[in-house]
Image: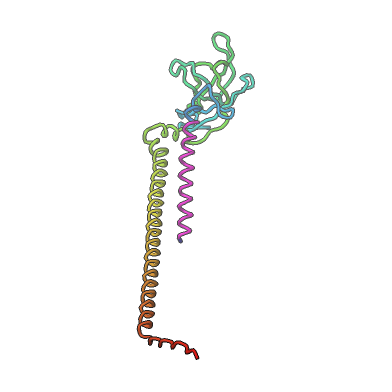
Amino acid sequence: MKKALNVIKTTMICLIVALAVFMMIFTIVSVTTFNRNDRDLFGYKAYIVNSDSMAATDFAAGDLIFVKEVYVGDLVEGDIITFISQDAESYGEVVTHKIRSKAVDAQGNPGFVTYGTTTGADDAVIVTFPYVLGRYEFHLDGVGSFFNFLKTPQGYIVCIFVPFMLLILYQGINCIRLFRRYKKEQNEEIRAEKAKIEAEREEANKMMAELLELKAQLQQQQQGAPAEEPKQPAQID
């Protein structure tokens, strides 16, 4: 049972560490890459969808889409492109819509008529080639919403601060346990050393008592022994 609990505890710690590290990496990558026209991730630009204009067929608000730069002349009707809007109502915003047809603007510049599949209405301004950022390739459901949540104070606390605080708390508890174990072992060593010294002292006292007893017995034997008779001098004839 104890071994199983240790395995579960180790697994939980590894998951928390992995989550905290993943959140840090994801935050760094997303801040430096998402919604940046001048940055790409493995050849793809990443954008967070802010509207449901394409929700009827492809992706919805909160999804994260990936766009690949392509040669504009290769784009055809039905492709979904990401572009910088020149419409007065959304000027400068990044929009991802489907190509309905090729066209030219009032100045004779080639471009595309685009539309959102949810309403089916054409965009007011033709998208000319210089403002095309790339062709839509795929998307990840809900990742954009998660990133937007991560940028809030609540998201930071839940996804980054709490995991690291749990790790710090766990390590603090481990340090306290190790210190207590060290003090316990140290006290046990001191008690063992004292017991050893006390045992040696008792042994020395016992030996001393035996020596004194032996000395007393020898003295008694000497005092109780008969005196020797004096030897007679030899007679000379």
Tell me which segment is drawn in magenta: 2-29
What residue lies at 48% left-to-right and 50% top-to-bottom? 11
Comparing 128 with 216, the one in front is: 216
What residue lies at 45% left-to-right and 33% top-to-bottom? 147
Asked if the magenta segment contains residue 144, the reply would be no
Comparing 156 with 221, the one in front is: 221
What residue lies at 39% left-to-right and 52% top-to-bottom? 177
* Above or below: residue 40 compared with residue 218: above
Q: Is residue 85 visible?
A: yes
Could you tell me residue 143's position as x and y percent? Answer: 48, 35
Q: Main secondary structure of the magenta part?
A: helix
Q: Is residue 56 visible?
A: no
Left or right placement of residue 186 versus residue 84 in this view: left
> What colour scheme has been applied to the protein in the rendered image?
rainbow
Asked if the magenta segment contains residue 8, the reply would be yes
Looking at the image, which residue sits at the far front?
A: 237
Could you tell me residue 50's position as x and y percent? Answer: 45, 28
